[in-house]
Image: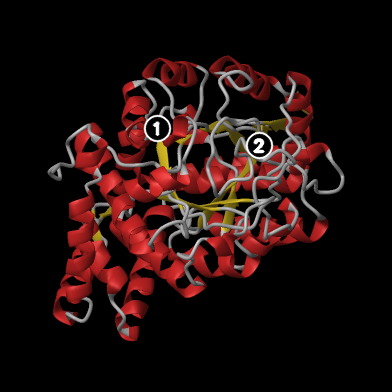
Amino acid sequence: MAKYDPKSLKAEEFINDEEILETIKYAEENKNNLSLIDEILEKARPKKQGKGYVCSGLTHREASVLLACEDPKKIEEMYKLAKEIKLAFYGNRIVMFAPLYLSNYCVNGCVYCPYHMKNKHITRKKLTQEEVRQEVIALQDMGHKRLAIEAGEDPVNNPIEYILDCIDTIYSVHHKNGDIRRVNVNIAATTVENYKKLKDAGIGTYILFQETYNKKGYLELHPTGPKHDYDYHTEAMDRAMDGGIDDVGLGVLFGLEGYKYEFAGLLMHAEHLEAVHGVGPHTISVPRVKHADDIDPDVFDNGISDEMFKKIIACIRIAVPYTGMIISTRESEKVRGEVLELGISQISGASRTSVGGYTEEERPHDSEQFDVSDQRTLDEVVNWLMKLGFIPSFCTACYREGRTGDRFMSLCKSGQILNCCHPNALMTLAEYLVDYAEDETKEIGFKLIKDELSKIPTDKVRNIAMEHIEDIKNSNKRDFRF
């Protein structure tokens, strides 16, 4: 039997079934051990250091104890701590992005996804480069600056060359004051050579959801196609980092398997990346199974309640304090609002999960990957965030200034984020307000910017940010960044 080893490059050793089962057993045995829970919470608390904070984070076993805890007072303490950690390292900024679906051709047989090869009635579509260009213009006209491109796995229809051509096209489109400044990529596990090509193409984060860390369940959920290879899929992030990609994004599809198993596996994967590469995941996503063409989420009997979903998000934030957390439009406005302060740092807005969906006036459903619960416009989402006290950020500066991987983490830990990410968020919000916002959103936004500028701790940085915001208001100058 394989032994648990976070430094191993073998999937069965760094995501070790025996270790996960022992972790779940340990958490269950200690879920009412309030003195241990207090020790774990104290260990995770941010400690002031210089101008910033440091956090030790938690092991997968410690975090699993918090997840298992059922004491209402301790759960409230967890939520309070998650909020404290979120504010310490990410402030009140929420980064905005949109997915862009390039192709839904796929050779896999994933039973939870309507793109699976046996689905003969879904409309199959692959964007031409001109169609990619038109989609990008539609997204720029909303105000988006950051995209996550998505495509099914199909070596004939969606080879790496097609993905690279699409990235090229996306970066080449300059429409009015619009530019896509960061392209994140969510495509199937591939080779080190192909990851090097993606790195050379200037991608931001490489994202790959594990779907489930339970190998037995994984093989059943992926009965056919290249994705059936659990080890190759699970070891993909190591190949991506070997290919020079600093920022990688993890995620599971909650509801496919037991959430306790997935939670432990997800944190073990983060620990593995830290142990081997010196830096954990840049982001963790928390999607839940949703209805889609020929997919009924009720078929999967591991669904989690909204309350448990909130608890999972809070415990992830406590365990990995420096990692960004993403929530998509799979979730409703209500759920997204409740989890924002518990650790989420990125959300999508005005998403369409169909191929070619942004150029259509009416939301198309014939090629969607999943039903979108939050169907508001980007302006409505931006307006809503600001009313909740958050700064919608369209910033992509760190990636373009080379502040990725461990360099981003050191920035986060040192407290310099207030002199960097905070003013960058305000300047990109000003761009959005001037170029795209409705009148009410503008009014709320510029008042928020005025209030937030006073929180920048360094006079020089604050004055430069104020000058740049005046330039944005009074000219077509854009893309200022620290």
At label 2, which amino acid type do we have?
Answer: Leu
Tell me if residue 298 can be seen.
yes
Of marks 1 and 2, which one's residue comes earlier in the chain?
2
Quarter where residue 91 is shown: bottom left
Residue 360, image x, y percentages: 84, 41
Residue 75, image x, y percentages: 34, 78
Q: Which residue is mark 1?
A: 403
Tell me if residue 58 can be seen.
no
Residue 198, image x, y percentages: 48, 21
At label 1, which amino acid type do we have?
Answer: Arg
Q: Residue at x 14, y 79 (%)?
A: 35
Q: Residue at x 77, y 48 (%)?
A: 365
Residue 385, image x, y percentages: 62, 61
Of the pair 347 and 364, the residue shown nearer to us: 364
Side of 312 relative to 176 (left or right): left
Q: Residue at x 26, y 49 (%)?
A: 268
**Secondary structure found at label 2:** strand
Quote the CA–CA distance across marks 1 and 2.
25 Å
Q: In which quadrant of the rendered image does the N terminus lie? A: top left
Of the pair 204 and 467, the residue shown nearer to us: 204
Local crowd size for mark 1, using a 10 Å CA cut-off: few (<14), some (14–19), many (≥20): some
Of the pair 393 and 76, the residue shown nearer to us: 76
What numbered label is drawn on residue 100?
Answer: 2
- Residue placed farthest to the right in the image? 361
Side of 118 relative to 111 (left or right): right
Q: How many marks?
A: 2
Side of 337 relative to 56 (left or right): right
Local crowd size for mark 2, using a 10 Å CA cut-off: few (<14), some (14–19), many (≥20): many
Q: Nearer the viewer, mark 1 or mark 2?
A: 2
Of the pair 373 and 396, the residue shown nearer to us: 373
